[in-house]
Amino acid sequence: MQDWKEKIQAIIDEHAKKRAEVTTTLNTLLSELKVFAGGIKAQVIEVTDYPLTWKIEINGKVFLVTENDVDMAQTIMDQWEKPTGEKRDLNEVIQELLVEKFGE
């Protein structure tokens, strides 16, 4: 069995990996939006670590995307609404969340 210190370090490492993956994807997509939409303001304003939350601004509207939002959107369910263990593409999920949250 892993030592408790190794378990904590593994959680910290996984958290940092998730933060980096989502932040990089968000920044890439928001840059694409800025180019496409002719200079609108689109940016990640702030990232909070615990709980993992990204504050996004698009054209003056500010909204939050949480780690839970991303995890739920990535989870693939079977016909009985049970998680299959497979995950949807992060890029696709972030695009959907940006549209959903901006449209609220």
Image (tube, rainbow, N blue to C red):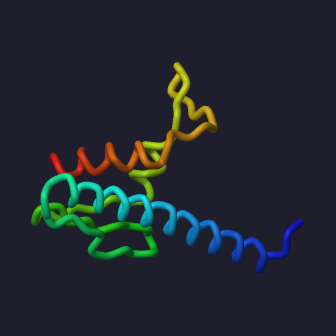
Q: Is residue 48 above or below residue 62?
A: below
Residue placed at 50% from the left, 43% from the top?
A: 89
Query: Looking at the picture, how far across and down is residue 66, in whole percent?
Result: 38, 60
User: Farthest residue in the right direction?
Assistant: 1
Front in this rendered view, residue 24 or 98? 24
Q: Is residue 6 above or below residue 67?
A: below
List the single residue furthest toward the left: 60
Q: Determine whether, in the image, residue 96 is placed left or right of residue 12.
A: left
Q: Is residue 70 above or below residue 1?
A: above
Q: Residue at x 33, y 59 (%)?
A: 65
Residue 103 is situated, as x and y percent measured from the top left of the image, at 16, 46
Q: Image point 15% across, 54% down: which residue?
A: 37
Q: Position of residue 61 (x, y in %)?
A: 13, 62
Residue 36 or 1: which is nearer the viewer? 36
Q: Please name the residue shown 77% across and 80% down the image.
A: 5
Q: Residue 84 at what x, y percent from top left?
A: 61, 32
Please state, as top left, top right, bottom left or bottom right, where the N terminus lies in the image. Answer: bottom right
Question: What is the count of numbered marks?
Answer: 0
- Outermost residue on the top side: it is 79
Pick the residue in front: 102 or 38. Answer: 38
The quadrant in which residue 43 appears is: bottom left
Q: Nearer the viewer, residue 102 or 25?
A: 25
Residue 39 image-quadrant placement? bottom left
Compared across the picture, whether 57 is left or right of 74 comes to left
Does residue 85 appear left or right of residue 90 in this picture? right
Horizontal side, residue 4 vs residue 75: left or right: right
